[in-house]
DNA sequence: ATATTTTCAGAATTTCATTCCGGATTTTTG
DNA sequence: CAAAAATCCGGAATGAAATTCTGAAAATAT
């Protein structure tokens, strides 16, 4: 078995690379190599390996939520009237299309869904709720929470 | 006033660029230029302008949550016993340090905080809750929600 | 102890980002 | 309405970084 394979297939060097790319994917391979104690080539191969293995699933630009016109965040909890597979799939598709919807979790407990929404002010939220979310047939009940502040958002978990 | 400035300082070309970079920041300026109908140079200048204006706040790699050892997601809602500024700051700092904590929202309503947590199984969550979250003095009450599935996660809102 | 596999580093190549320049278009000013 | 200024664009040249190629060192297995 190769040296780089521990329980999860990642050795400490891989993790170091991931910790760097997790917050800044514009570092050059040379800069990464320096920080993890390798030269360019093996560092580059490792990154490629991590990409092909799907450990790194993509590279994205982070946009300032306020500066693109969605300064306010709400959390909506939702219950559907019935829970057959088709209904759930339809609701999921509905949410995918809505630009205000950032995150969607299918949950256990009091509610079926927890949805994070980014809008422009309470007016923006009212419009979203009445004209978009509640247009979907079969919503039994919702509860809205206003977010005063977002204290943390990690695109990927720290490893 | 320059042509590229509308109500929010972004014209349609800027938005097209942002829509591309939002999901893939590894596109070359040439590829972006082709898709938005510009040549390399002006396209590159626009991207730089968006970076300097802070509309683009960074570039990151997205890691597969399961493949880095945190396949399961929980939502914890938290109430603190008292709400003076110092306590809130301390709790925020505490959460920043915890690798399991992905998102933290300071909220109105029934709870003070909504926290998204990534862990390895129920055991991982129990450990997180008892050994880490509840080590913080001053938590009055928590409620945990298990996430069956994450149906959507946009790093940045669609614009 | 030897063969095999894996990992590494250095140099060469290719691709891309970045800069520089001049021309066209739009907006502002007289 | 005309002239001046500012803005935006595209093409070519430069520089930097990604990627490929080669061979050596280290680790593992037989």
Image (cartoon, coloured by chain):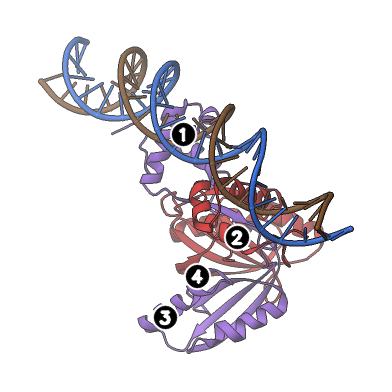
Chain colours: A red, B purple, C brown, D blue
**For the residue carrying disc 1, how many other residues have a C-alpha within 10 Å: few (<14), some (14-19), or many (20+)?**
some
Circle 2 is placed at which residue position? Answer: A13
Q: Are marks 2 and 1 on the same chain?
A: no
Where residue A1 appears, as percent x and y from the top left, is 78, 60
Q: Subunit of mark 3?
A: B
Circle 1 is placed at which residue position? Answer: B13
User: Closer to the observer: label 2 or label 1?
Assistant: 2
> Can residue A35 be seen?
yes
Q: What mark, if any, has residue A138 been given in the picture?
A: none
Relative horizontal placement of residue B53, taking residue B140 as reference (left or right): left
Quadrant housing residue B149: bottom right
Picture residue at 50% right of the left edge, 47% below the top: A30
**For the residue carrying disc 2, how many other residues have a C-alpha within 10 Å: few (<14), some (14-19), or many (20+)?**
some
> Can residue B10 be seen?
no
Circle 4 is placed at which residue position? Answer: B105
Quick one: quadrant of the C terminus of chain A?
bottom right
Where residue A67 appears, as percent x and y from the top left, is 41, 50
Picture residue at 52% right of the left edge, 29% below the top: B30
User: Closer to the observer: label 3 or label 1?
Assistant: 3
Quadrant housing residue A91: bottom right
User: Closer to the observer: label 2 or label 3?
Assistant: 2
Where residue B24 appears, as percent x and y from the top left, is 57, 43
Circle 3 is placed at which residue position? Answer: B90
Where residue A59 appears, as percent x and y from the top left, is 57, 48
Q: Nearer the viewer, residue B92 or B132?
A: B132
The Cα atoms of the two marked residues, 2 and 3, are separated by 33 Å
Picture residue at 45% right of the left edge, 76% below the top: B92
Q: Describe the element under mark 3 as helix, strand or loop.
A: helix
């Amino acid at each position: 078995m190769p040296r780089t394979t521990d329980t999860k297939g990642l050795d400490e060097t891989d993790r170091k690379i991931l910790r760097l790319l997790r917050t800044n994917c514009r570092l050059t391979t040379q800069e990464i190599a320096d920080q993890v104690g390798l030269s360019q080539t093996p560092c580059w191969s490792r990154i490629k390996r991590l990409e092909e293995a799907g450990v790194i699933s993509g590279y994205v630009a982070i946009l300032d939520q306020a500066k693109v016109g969605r300064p306010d965040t709400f959390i909506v909890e939702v219950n559907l009237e019935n829970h057959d597979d088709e209904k759930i799939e339809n609701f999921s598709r509905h949410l995918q299309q809505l630009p205000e919807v950032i995150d969607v979790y299918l949950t256990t407990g009091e509610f079926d869904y927890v949805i994070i929404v980014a809008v422009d002010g309470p007016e923006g939220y009212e419009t979203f709720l009445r004209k978009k979310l509640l247009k979907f047939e079969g919503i039994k009940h919702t509860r809205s929470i206003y977010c005063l502040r977002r204290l943390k958002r990690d695109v990927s978990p720290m490893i």
